[in-house]
Image: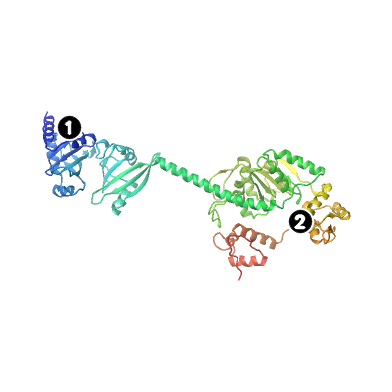
């Protein structure tokens, strides 16, 4: 009864106070507990939220105990009258208010200047009892109508106020009203207070991401904190970054593919078609037609110079992959330490000289065909990786951890006996069976005697135009010589002989006496390369791979592990010339 009567007394005082109108009653529309007080600390209006909070206390005693305890009221009122917001706390003992234990009340004052005399709007914050909180977020000072979290912290990190929407992030921070910030949030708040400037920070909370703005207010003893749930924005940003990464990857791949196709076009302009009408050649073309329509892996065997690459081109041209590139790799021409990078690509920094990501030949051939020439020379340690591509359609770049899926048809070729290589432990038996799904043997020219005349006339027409001479025919005795020879170098040797003969011929009839010597030693055609030849080829390959850059981390000297000055001497010694149009020009000789 005492509490009820006191509440009625205070209410009657407030309602009868002059100047209380419709504007003040709008305070009833917010859930934050609020009251109006005069310069003399007399309450003249309470909204419904404040009345609800104070139902448990004798309001007269409550105001007599609380408002006089506001420290330094005179100076505080001066700041309030100047338009500043003042936040303070009042600590009350159990004796101050009957029925209450030790209590701390947070109060925030701001000026209502359109009243005469002016009064202060006082917002009641958290009520702390026994060092615990009896208020919830619903009694915070900020309007709960705001759908985004809004909070206020003291400069020592204590949470003064929070609206209802703050529940999720406060739960993530394991924080309640009156508690103090810890961890990253406290570190950010400390920096903001020290620097006096606003700062945004992202905080992952479970499956959500919150972007938190810490905004210090000048001349005030607190920091306002505003929170936006940016989960969807972050997801969209991540998806955009992923998409841009894919675009960059595709751009890189297209650039590599374009560069490769330009090289292919140059070769294609001078390439030959498969020519022949012998039984061996007819049987070969029948097999090519059968396998071209499928995606079967093909292994082409045969002596050097029999046109194994032409067979691979014919298979690709007759397949459903003909609109995608046929990518060639000569496994014998690449150094062992570079072939893995050529086949599978590498990431930036994967090894010395890897200054950028490189797309491998398998990725370039995705949805197309890759032709692995001289497959018998593939290093044993790479054969297992090739087997994985055949079995799983997966690879990893050198220095990378991402598994890349490719859809590639593999055509391989060899002039070796892979059975002998398997017996010698130089070739994996399981890889052989994977490659040998559809074997094709390219017949040597000595088994295609009927085709020599067709091939010779074809090469005469080709090189007459190229060299600029008009050769109308090959005399019968010379053709008989061509037919009688065994051609250890096969079609390639015949092509070379015809080109040489056209150069040496003066009239319109092909003369091959000087160009063709039946006493030629076939073994000389297969002589091993000298150290000088091997070294020249390695330097040439390194320069081309490094865009003819000699020095620096991405230079050929680093790739070859030699001094730049030594490399320049070798370039000059071997007469290596930089092709026209290369981007980097730094080959200089003293």
Identify the image quadrant of residue 160. Answer: top left
The structure residue drawn at horizontal position 76% and vertical position 59%, both measured from the top left corner, is: 467
121 above or below 576? above
Image quarter (top left, top right, bottom left or bottom right) of the N terminus = top left
Secondary structure at numbered mark 2: helix
Q: Viewed as shown, does residue 511 lie left or right of 421?
A: right
Which one is earlier in the sequence, the residue at label 1 or at label 2? 1
**Residue sitting farthest toward the top:** 1
Q: From the image, tell me which residue sits under label 2.
A: 465
**Structural crowding at the residue carrying mark 2, measured as other residues with C-alpha within 10 Å and reported as few (<14), some (14–19) or many (≥20):** few
Q: How far apart are marks 1 and 2 (CA)?
A: 110 Å
Whether residue 426 can be seen here: no
Q: Residue at x 27, y 45 (%)?
A: 153
Q: Which residue has dot 1 on it? A: 55
Residue 5, relative to residue 373: is it above or below? above
Of 363 and 135, nearer the camera is 363
Q: Nearer the viewer, residue 225 or 508?
A: 508
Please state which of the two labelled residues, at mark 1 or mark 2, is closer to the viewer: 2
- Residue 383 in the image: state x and y as whole percent: 64, 47
Give coordinates of residue 13: x percent, y percent.
11, 35
Secondary structure beneath label 1: helix
- Say if mark 1 contacts mark 2, CB within 8 Å: no
Residue 52: give x, y in percent of width and height: 20, 32
Residue at the bottom extreme of this rendering: 590
């Amino acid at each position: 009864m005492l509490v009820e009567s006191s509440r009625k007394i205070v209410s009657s005082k407030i309602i009868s106070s002059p100047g209380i109108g419709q504007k003040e009653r709008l305070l009833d529309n917010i859930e934050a507990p609020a009251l109006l007080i005069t310069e003399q600390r007399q309450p003249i209006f309470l909204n419904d939220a404040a009345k609800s909070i104070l139902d448990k206390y004798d309001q007269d005693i409550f105001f007599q105990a609380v408002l006089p305890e506001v420290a330094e009221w005179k100076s505080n009122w001066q700041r309030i009258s100047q338009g500043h917001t003042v936040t303070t706390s009042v600590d009350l003992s159990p004796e101050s208010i009957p029925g209450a234990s030790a209590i701390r009340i947070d109060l925030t004052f701001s000026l209502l200047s359109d009243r005469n005399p002016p009064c202060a709007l006082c917002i009641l914050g958290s009520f702390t009892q026994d060092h615990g909180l009896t208020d919830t977020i619903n009694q915070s000072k900020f309007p709960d109508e705001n759908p985004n979290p809004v909070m206020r912290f003291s400069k020592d990190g204590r949470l003064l106020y929070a609206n209802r929407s703050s529940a999720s992030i406060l739960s993530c921070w394991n924080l309640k009203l009156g508690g103090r910030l810890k961890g990253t949030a406290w570190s950010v708040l400390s920096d903001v207070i020290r620097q006096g400037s606003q700062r945004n920070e992202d905080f992952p909370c479970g499956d959500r991401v919150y972007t938190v703005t810490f905004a210090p207010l000048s001349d005030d003893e607190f920091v306002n904190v505003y929170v936006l749930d940016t989960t969807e924005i972050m997801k969209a940003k991540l998806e955009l970054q992923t998409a841009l990464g894919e675009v960059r990857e595709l751009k890189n791949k297209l650039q590599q593919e374009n560069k490769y196709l330009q090289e292919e076009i140059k070769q294609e302009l001078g390439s030959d078609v498969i020519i022949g009408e012998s039984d061996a050649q007819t049987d070969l073309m029948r097999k090519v037609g059968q396998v071209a329509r499928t995606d079967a892996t093909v292994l082409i065997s045969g002596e050097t110079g029999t046109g194994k690459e032409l067979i691979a081109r014919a298979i690709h041209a007759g397949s459903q992959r003909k609109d995608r590139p046929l990518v060639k790799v000569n496994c014998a021409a690449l150094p062992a330490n570079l072939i893995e990078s050529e086949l599978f690509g590498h990431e930036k920094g994967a090894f010395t000289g890897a200054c950028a990501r490189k797309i491998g030949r398998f990725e370039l051939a995705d949805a197309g065909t890759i032709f692995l020439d001289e497959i018998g020379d593939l290093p044993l340690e790479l054969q297992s990786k090739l087997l994985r591509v055949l079995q799983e359609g997966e690879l990893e770049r050198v220095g990378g951890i991402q598994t890349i899926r490719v859809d590639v048809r593999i055509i391989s070729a060899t002039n070796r006996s892979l059975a002998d290589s398997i017996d010698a432990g130089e070739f994996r038996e399981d890889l052989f069976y994977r490659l040998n799904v559809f074997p094709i043997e390219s017949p040597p020219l000595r088994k295609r005697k009927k085709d020599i005349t067709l091939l010779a006339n074809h090469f005469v027409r080709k090189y007459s135009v190229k060299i600029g001479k008009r050769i109308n025919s090959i005399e019968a005795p010379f053709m008989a010589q061509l037919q009688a020879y065994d051609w250890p170098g096969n079609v390639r040797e015949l092509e070379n002989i015809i080109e040489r003969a056209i150069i040496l011929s003066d009239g319109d009839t092909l003369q091959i006496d000087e160009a063709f010597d039946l006493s030629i030693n076939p073994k000389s055609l297969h002589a091993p390369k000298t150290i000088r030849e091997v070294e020249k080829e390695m330097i040439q390959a390194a320069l081309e791979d490094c865009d003819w850059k000699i020095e620096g981390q991405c230079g050929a000297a680093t790739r070859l592990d030699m001094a730049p000055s030594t490399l320049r001497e070798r370039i000059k010694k071997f007469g290596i010339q930089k092709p026209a149009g290369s981007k980097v020009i730094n080959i200089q000789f003293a």
